[in-house]
Amino acid sequence: MRYMATYDLMESFRNANQWLGATALSFASYPGFAMVPNPALQWMAAWGEVTERTFQRMVVKPDWGIRTFVCPDGKDHLVTVDTVVERPFGDLIHFNVVGREPNPRKVLLVAPMSGHYATLLRSTVKSLLVDCEVYVTDWHNARDIPVSEGKFDVEDYSLYLVDFMKELGPDTHVIAVCQPAPLTLAATAYLAELDPDAQPRTLTLIGGPIDPDAAQTDVTDFGARVTMGQLEETMIQRVGFKYKGVGRMVYPGLLQLASFMSMNGERHTKAFSDQIMRVMQGEAGDHDPHNRFYDEYLAVMDMTAEFYLSTVERVFKNREIAKNEFVVNGHKVDIGKITTVAVKTVEGEKDDISAPGQCVAALDLCTGLPDEKKAQHVEPGAGHYGIFAGSSWRNNIRPLVLDFIDANADGPSPRASARKPKVKKAANKNAAA
């Protein structure tokens, strides 16, 4: 499958379905048919509307959609997304609340590179923007990156994080969500050895596979069952002629999306059937719950082949992070060298992607870190998405993360005068929380 023709065939299939949807909507909405009402035509128009939108969203990068923010002064301030560091495979961006004094909490939110854009963390960003100065890693779609820019694997990813942390300085608080958790831990250890003055204040790891073997999931079972040769043969293709990255070897976003949806096929089928009926009955809206979710879920990006394959081989199969044997740019990283950065792990009790036990393994690897600098939290009843963007994040985890940041920041807590005396929650295991 490693040929441009296969990549272009998938794009042709997507394009054809978008066209069929638009055609069905246009035909069934012809004004003349209104004289003879027919439920079949109404259903056809609804099917066309849902189908066109569905396949169109697969190649569109969503907008952040964070335009204004009400500050304590009662004024509605504009929010601009500024690029701080620009790189071929990803940028460091800053959500600048125009006219607001810089917030003392500087947070670097490390977004996953696992098929979706960084905008998947939109709600996370919005919730943190209230109390923090928020920076995000905005990874680029590999199909749009020319081959001349070279490779991008797990070591390059780690070095990007190192550079971003250096850019923001030592008063930064890093939050890594899901896939980047092990590489962010490695990047922090890399700085601890080679540039300790650039280390962040705190590191919060949310639902990441630090040790994939600590608890089995479908993801870890797949990684153990499939050989690297099988993955390369069945998952890797060359970008077609339509995009700037023509010829680049990638794990295509459309192929990833097919894998995502096949895991919960019945649920997605019902969701789209119900949406067609809502459109038919005039009960759907442009920003209704279905469209808000699927506009983001369906927007997928290609990953470079070397990043995908090296992640599977080095993080999941060889467990280089879990064994503290990870090498970056010829340097063997020692996670035990982290001695001053406070580390907190967050897991969801019902996380079926990175099950409880996988992320908290990071604390055992930090052998040089005193116990008072370590903390962990398992959120009862929460799934993978809920621990960084759902109600569990908003109501329970976000306040805990902010308390953890404040407890390990230099100087007085920025929330000290505004918050009530807190009662320590049992879910946190030590004073660092």
Image: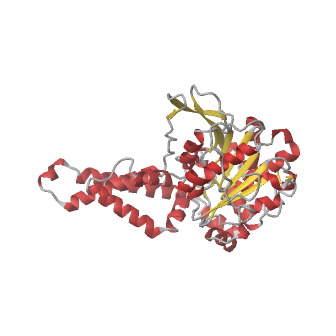
Q: Residue at x 58, y 48 (%)?
A: 143
> Where's residue 344, x and y in %?
73, 54
User: What residue is rendered at 56% in x and 60% in y?
Assistant: 256
Q: Closer to the camera, 100 or 282?
A: 100
| Of residues 200 and 72, the one drawn nearer to the viewer in this rendering | 72
Report whether residue 239 is seen: no
Query: As drawn, which residue projects farthest toward the left?
Result: 35
Question: In the displayed structure, would residue 66 be above or below residue 383?
Answer: above
Q: Quadrant of residue 318?
A: bottom right
Q: Is residue 405 left or right of residue 274?
A: right
Q: How many marks?
A: 0
Q: Residue at x 69, y 68 (%)?
A: 229
Residue 161 image offset from top left, x and y in percent: 73, 45
Q: Which quadrant: the N terminus?
A: bottom right
Q: Is 402 drawn above or below residue 101 in the view shown?
A: below
Q: Is the image coloured rainbow, by chain, by secondary structure, or in one colour?
A: secondary structure
Q: Nearer the viewer, residue 73 or 219?
A: 73
Q: Is residue 113 above or below residue 79?
A: below
Furthest residue toward bottom: 225
Where's residue 120, x and y in %?
55, 50
Tell me which corner region of the image, top left, top right, bottom left or bottom right, holds residue 275: bottom left
Residue 370 visible in the snapshot: yes
Which percent across, then down, holds residue 354?
65, 64
